[in-house]
Image (cartoon, rainbow, N blue to C red):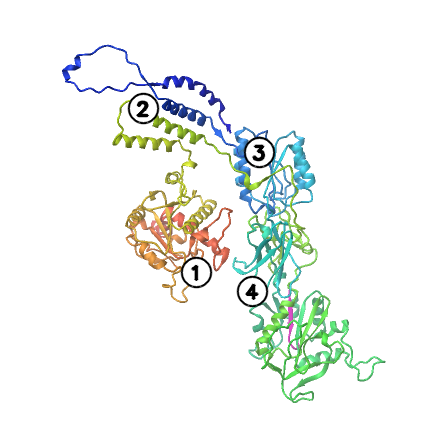
Amino acid sequence: MIFQAPVLLAALAILPVVWLLLRALPPAPRRQVFPAIMLLRGLRARMTDAATAPPWLLLLRCLALTGLIVGLAGPLIVRDRQAAATDAAGNVLLVLDNGWAASPGWARRIAALDVVLDRAGRAGRQARLLTTAPGLAGEAPAAGAPMTPALLRGALDTARARPWPTDRAAAAQALRDLAATGWHGPVVYVSDGLAGPSDGAFATALAAIGPVRTLRAPTPTLAVLRPAPPADGALAVAVAAVPSPHPRRMTVRAETADGGVLGLVPVPLPAGDDHADASVAMPAELRNRIDRLVLEDMSGPAGVRLLDEGDRRRPVGLVSVGGTDTPLVGPLFYLRRALSPTAEIREGRVATLLARPLSVLIAPDGALGDPETRRAVAAWVRKGGMLVRFAGPLLNRATAPDTPTDAQAPDTPPNAPPPAPAAAQLEDTLLPVPLMEGERQLGGAMSWGKPQPLAPFAAASPFHGLAVPADVTISRQVLARPATDLDDHSWARLADGTPLVTHAALGSGEIVLFHVTGTADWSNLPLSGLFVAMLRRLAERATGVEAPADHSLLAPYMTLDSDAILVPPPPGARALPADAFGATPASAAHPAGLYGPRTARRALNVGDAAGPLAAQAAIGQVADLDGQVHDIAPGPWLVAAALLLLVVDAMVSLLLRGGRLGGKRLGGGLLLVLLCGMAALPGPLSAATDPDRGAPVPGAALETRLGYILTGHDDVDTVSREGLQGLSNYANARTSAVLGHPDGVVPERDDLSYYPMLYWPVTPDATVNPARAAALNAYMQHGGILMIDSQGVDPATVAPGAAGAGFAAPAPGTAAALRRMTQGLDIPPLTRLDDHHVLAHTFYLLHDFPGRYGGLPVWVSREGDSANDGVSPVIIGASDWAHAWAVDAQGDTPYATTPDGDTQRTTAYRFGVNAVLYALTGNYKADQVHVPALLKRLGE
């Protein structure tokens, strides 16, 4: 134990004197019954000696004085003597890893440094702060100026992790520069636990300043999402982690741009492993909606992998020809209908389509008759595009003159089949296989007896696994010339073995030919669901959008912050060459995020160029980050106990003198004891012990606080507290309101006049309570607003298909509970809240008012009611606002909002801000609505 004011302990020397003084006890009065006249007889002047106090009472008095002296001396119970001695040995240097690896558990790191600053402040030391990550503008790490711990604590409260890695080499140079100025003293290093290439020089520079104490988590939990080799038909991702001695089970979440969850993929990581692969398998129409992959329980940019246009593979170009838009018979009619649900359709001439990034180009019969057009398409295919062609009456006439199908080598037998087209011929004709002249059709020269069905798809075909309907038949087609490698070029065949879909590679791309038309003229394939599935398989096989792969610069569009939220780029962000993506690590100059224009957007992620993750070697003395706790100050408790003992001494002395402690005296004495004890207790320790109650009501008299009505359900009350805390934080950051921590209240017991707004969640077991109703009526009559939330829809009352009911969780029994809860409340006539109400534009301009669930109605009193100056005393809904606002101890939002994700959560926060300001300011916004009319009248 140490003392903050040890000089006061000198007062203990007077205890012997106090002992002598306190030994005296006034003599007890003598009782005698006598006539009044006898008062004058027997009076004699004599000396009376004071009685001596009993030893136990003397001990009680000395103990009280000792406690008072020791308590005022400021004793401290040091919970880590070695750390306290190190931190107080001199001016302390705080070194903080604030790169992306420090984002998980950032609040714990700041809390640990707060303990160190407490110790330095008691010792009268100064402190400096050095962060190891570059600044927002890319400036190198540098030690801050020395300041008092109180000032440095304020700077730490506003500090945030950076969404790029640390630069320990630059931090080591900053340490060497600091040592050159003569600064020496203890060093407290808060590590992110991740090893780096410059750790050796960094550790040496730390040791040159003074003794080093490293604070870090004992068990490595850091993980990052990295790219993985493409999986067959699935979106692949790898989870890289610092090896742990224990097995872990992680979950990768596939999210849309608005925060909706499309899928969850469990990823087991065995003990000792540093990576695991995962694949997100889902239909193409859902996969194309994935905007990011998120690693659950790993906050910060390391747990997010943004996807770009290259991952979506969507744009498909349809080459326009004559009669394109003719319903049912136009060459693009069925193609457009088949691809529009899952692809971005672009139509036009070849030159127009190829001027923009494109994944698949589909050409109907007659679209590629011009040699110059074919050369342009061939060049595009060589760069990775996929050309899909459809046969027709014009195909043979357009290509036969340019295709040397009848030319024979001198040593080739007259009836031998020619080889497959060479690369030059393929590029010239854009046909994957040589074709025979004429078409095979029902009743023609090369006819079959009846229309042919399709054969099952081979295992090597991209169509493998698709069911072949028996009613899909082919009545006319163009024939491939027989060749030894024809099987290698065939993806689909008829039942008699005739190729139906052939392909050939050209450069990095592919050419695919359907040997039938894209209309119902030659077959009923375009009328079937198989046709749709085949085109979607081809689009999935395509390489996707080819963003510029040269050295052209792509400017940052949006970047990830330390909370993995897309925000405008920081001032130091710079453009990145297109060919550098995938090999450039995230940095202050190139933070993780989205780059380039919308049509060719590229994503840069933390895990793209991150090497293997490893635990950092120990530097100096290593301590547990979570083991840093504040020292215990028993001084206020000792003072309180001493005062109580002195009160007890006074009461005992009165008894020993023959006094009586009955009735009012006993009550007054006990009240005096209670008041003295409460006055002596310190503020934080005198609060109610019930965590749901929060701070005592007088705290709400010193600062503005929101309140919530306790329901008796710990889970509901915890969410109410977290929700109002999140709303208070949001309002503090964006408005001039200053809100403290929310309080839980019991209306019939607590004073509600301190709270501008009360949140009241509905629980199915709610009962009628006349005392509560009376207290709430008085609260609303004096200007308070009661926000009642059933946190879901009662299935017994919602109509089938009602707006929003499909997204809201069922809350059975809440409708009847709401009627019981509000029995006896003076609730005015209600109307549905719309965007014309003052509540819709108190601060933000809102058109809907969601919570955790969207699309549900909100009810308020009718405007124009003269009661309460036109302010609605109640807001009633079922949107579950508390879960949408809730923020846990780590600063995360643990509850999903449906159906619109983060966008909906932001709107919910904004509605909460409007409600708070509506409660604080009343209807002043309604007065503003009438300003134009007032000005007009003044002008008249």
Q: Are marks 2 and 4 in contact (CB under 8 Å)?
A: no
Q: CA distance from mark 4 to mark 3?
A: 54 Å
Amino acid tagged 2: Ser
Q: Earlier in the sequence, mark 3 or mark 1?
A: 3
Q: Earlier in the sequence, mark 1 or mark 2?
A: 2
Q: CA distance from mark 1 to mark 2?
A: 68 Å
- Magenta highlight range: 357-366
Magenta span: predominant SS is loop
Q: Which residue is mark 2?
A: 653
Along the line of sight, which residue is nearer the eye, 823 or 34?
A: 34
Along the line of sight, which residue is nearer the eye, 872 or 933?
A: 872
Can residue 902 be seen here? yes
Mark number for residue 808?
1
Amino acid tagged 1: Ala
Is 583 on the left or on the right of 125, as rendered?
Answer: right
Query: Which image quadrant for residue 598?
Result: bottom right
Q: Which residue is mark 4?
A: 286
